[in-house]
Image (cartoon, rainbow, N blue to C red):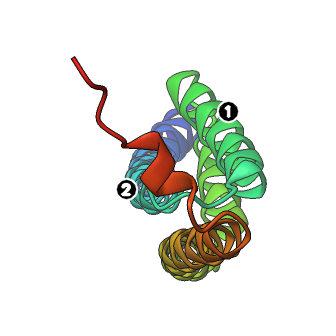
Amino acid sequence: MVLELRNVKLICVFSLVLLLMFGGSSSSLVAAQQSASSQAISDAQSRLISCFDAAQTAETAGANISKLTNTLNDAGALLSNAKYAYSIGNFTNAQRLAVESQNVLSGFVSEATSLTATAKQDSNTNFLVNVVGSVVGTILVLVGSIIVWRIIKKKYPDSEEQAIEPVAV
């Protein structure tokens, strides 16, 4: 009986030691997952903000950003789902969704920069066309007016003198 009690004590102590070892590593694993998912969410949020700024710059330049807006909406939805998964303790899914959100934004800034440059170039071209077109149009109207005036003057050479004759009082 003493031998059995001793074995039971030994098994209980051994079980307690195993439980503490694996229980501690489980909590450290959860803490590591929590930290990794928190960092992934923070990185995704920073990237979303920088992409939003790039899209806003492109829109200010006059670019059509509807495709960029759709991409931002998709990434934002993924980030929102990642934050929700994090809030309920699903750290693995939160990290996966945050990384997916960042992947959706891959190449976004370069595309927005390209659209910005194209919009600025188009704006400059439109400005030049408008200025040159206005100047040329004005010159054509002036030249046309002078030509018409000369034609009328040749056809009615004395009409000017007759119209200015003084009236006797």
Q: Which residue is mark 1?
A: 81
- Asked if residue 159 lies left or right of residue 73, the reply is left
User: Closer to the camera, 66 or 70?
Assistant: 66
* Residue 147 spot, x, y in % from top left: 64, 78
How much space separates mark 1 and mark 2, taking CA atoms? 16 Å
Rendered residue at 73%/69% (across/down): 155
Three-letter amino acid code at the position of disc 1: Asn
Q: Can residue 29 be seen here?
A: no
Q: How many marks?
A: 2
* Residue 121 spot, x, y in % from top left: 54, 82
User: Closer to the camera, 32 or 51?
Assistant: 51
Identify whether 35 is placed above or below 116: above
Q: Which residue is mark 2?
A: 46
User: Closer to the camera, 90 or 79?
Assistant: 79
Rendered residue at 42%/59% (across/down): 57
SS at badge 1: helix
Residue sitting at the far front: 169
* Residue 151 spot, x, y in % from top left: 70, 74
Residue sitting at the far top: 169
Identify whether 56 is placed above or below 143: above
* Label 2 environment density (alpha carbons within 10 Å; few <14, some 14–19, many ≥20): few
SS at badge 2: helix
User: Closer to the camera, 145 or 85?
Assistant: 145
* Residue 75 spot, x, y in % from top left: 67, 49
Q: Can residue 84 be seen here?
A: yes
Among numbered discs 1 and 2, the one appearing first in the sequence: 2
Three-letter amino acid code at the position of disc 2: Ser
Q: Quadrant of the C terminus?
A: top left
Rendered residue at 37%/56% (across/down): 46
Is the residue under label 2 in contact with that under label 1 (CB below 8 Å)? no
In the picture, the disc for residue 127 is none
